[in-house]
Image (spheres, coloured by chain):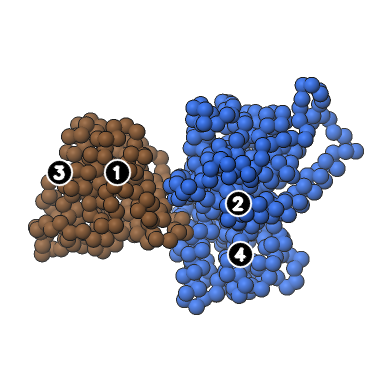
Amino acid sequence: MKQVMEGSHAASEAVRLAKVQVISAYPITPQTHIVEALAEYCENGTMDARFLCVESEHSALAAVISASTMGVRTFTATSSHGLALMHELLHWASGARLPIVMAEVNRALGPGWNIWADQTDSLAQRDTGWIQFYCEDGQEVFDTTLHAFRLAEWVNLPVMVIQDAFFLSHTLEPVDIPDQKQVDQFLPPFSSGVKLDTEKPCNMGQLTPPSIYMEMRQHIQMAMEQVSSCYSEVEKEFSALFDRQYGPVEPVACEDAEVILVVSGTIAGTCRSVISDLRSKGEKPGMLKIKMFRPFPADFVRRAVRAAKKVAVIDRNISFGAGGIFCQEVKSALYNMDPHPPVFGYIAGLGGRDVTPDSLEAIYWKTKKGDLLKGESTWVETQEVELKN
Amino acid sequence: MKEIRFHGRGGQGTVVASVILAKAFFSAGYYVQTFPHFGVERRGAPVEAYLRLDKKKILIRSNVYNPDAVIVQDRKLLETADVTKGLKPGGWILINFPVRPENLEPFIGYKLAYVDATGIAVENNLGTHTHPMVNTAMTGAFSGILETLPLHAVTSAIQEEISVKPEQNVKAATLAFEAVACFGIVNQYNGVGKIEKQKNE
């Protein structure tokens, strides 16, 4: 049934229907609403789950790692500084091949202290071995959270389901929430092949010498390489039941596009309306939404932008000294393709700065008319700031 | 697509008012999107919330700059906040005012509606004399100026959204629906204006 709810609660509803057994989290704006709802569900019996209260995000992830090692379905949620504090254990979760699902609300890192949307927090964790999905609206948050459990438990890797602070987490819109029976058809109870069992004692995560460590790493990479095909299977089953499908990337009007705008998260929604406005004026823009960031869907990106004259990547994030992070990935995906379109990088919307239809249209025109700039990226709509001694 | 901006003060239930109207419009067949001003809320400080509605899915995810209507829960905000900023010419201003505003200057070029939401809230024991909860009365009044939003959609959204004194809140909305007074577009000549109850989008 369709209900008007915020992105945060779309995540909580999916976790409730996934019958997660252990949840642990530490509150941080703008993630708090997600676990607030779940804590209530655990308290009032709506969910048959344990909610473990802890003193930090580091402990929250440690708690779900332990629970997951015992073979139960687990969930945590965080944002920004909370995710940064989890960093050490993010590696542990993927190295131990635990199918933990996390809701991550993209928020800027301080200082300056800022609670607003910015993808740098999750993208800074791109090398930790977590699968990453970026969502555009509440429905996609709900659906992807359910996908995430299936996928994580299939490939034995943890998954982050990511949404923009406020533009999605605190925005209410209609979201179709199916009933428990339908979700049970898609997501059976979790049964772990490898788990700690007091009847059959064993050790996990012991000292691993050079003679075997490297193969363990290779196996994680091999699992990542399977994600794309597994995800397509998961989506096929999901769409048979719910009639919704997203894909690791979504090309919009790319076939004959001259300039393709590459976007992710909520900017994709605004971009769709800009593309159709420009099309109605006789222009030929296209849009490529990247949903899956890890593993990076390089093949899909290559296919989508192959025929374009120019590609503009819009990044709500920054890797200082290098540029936008999606832009780097797109460039490296295209490098061995000959010929490939030139790639323009734009930094926009950091720390919750609004990215309006006008901002995106200006990026389109600048790319269409411009030559490649010398720098790695163009900063969008920044002001001249006078420096004082 | 129509865009509505809500002005109120922290603690007045401004965001709740936007959620009630969102749910009401949704049940009346609209696609809706509502969000608070993304900031740090403090009690008593001016706050804003926004609502978009359309007959098709709303794609845009940026802030609201040029609303079609504004709802002002506290008339004192006229002195401290630019409540008509970006408001489309001829757009609605619904304001909580005990009597017909004497000074129509701030409303020139817009359609004006007023309702004594504070009086209605106090009469129904919503909040206190110093902090009346006017949000449900304001949503009822908004329904009163729009033919597209039936009162029953608002009252059932109130029942869904508000657990404290649901009957009194529904009553406040109903009274405000009946009591709201609407001007046409205020201009310099009819500035002293006569009030005509008129309903349109």
Give the answer, above or below, for where B184 lies relative to B7.
below
Q: Residue at 75% of width from left, 68% of height from top?
A: A337
Real-space Cα distance between discs 4 and 1?
Answer: 42 Å
- How packed is label 4: few (under 14 Cα within 10 Å), some, or many (20 or more)? many
Near mark 2 (Cα within 10 A), the count class, few <14, some 14-19 or many ≥20, is: few
Which of the labelled discs sits on residue A241, or is there none? 2
The amino acid beneath tag 4 is: Pro
Q: Is residue A77 visible?
A: yes
Q: Quadrant of residue A261?
A: bottom right
User: Considering depth in this image, is B176 or A259 the residue closer to the camera?
Assistant: B176
Q: Residues within 10 Å of mark 3 (few under 14, many from 20)?
A: some
- Closer to viewer: mark 4 or mark 2: 2
- Residue B189: x, y in percent? 10, 64
Q: Helix, strand, or loop for circle 2?
A: helix
Distance between the alpha carbons at the discs numbered 3 and 4: 55 Å
Labelled disc at residue A251: 4
Q: Which chain is brown?
A: B
Which residue in the structure is indicated by mark 1?
B155
For the residues labelled 4 and 2, say whether their Cβ atoms are less than 8 Å apart: no
In the image, residue A190 above or below residue A383:
above
Which residue is at 54% across, 53% downward? Answer: A136
Please state which amino acid type lies under the numbered disc 3.
Answer: Pro
**Residue A254 location, x and y as percent?**
60, 70
Q: Does label 4 lie on the same chain as label 3? A: no
What is the chain letter for disc 2? A
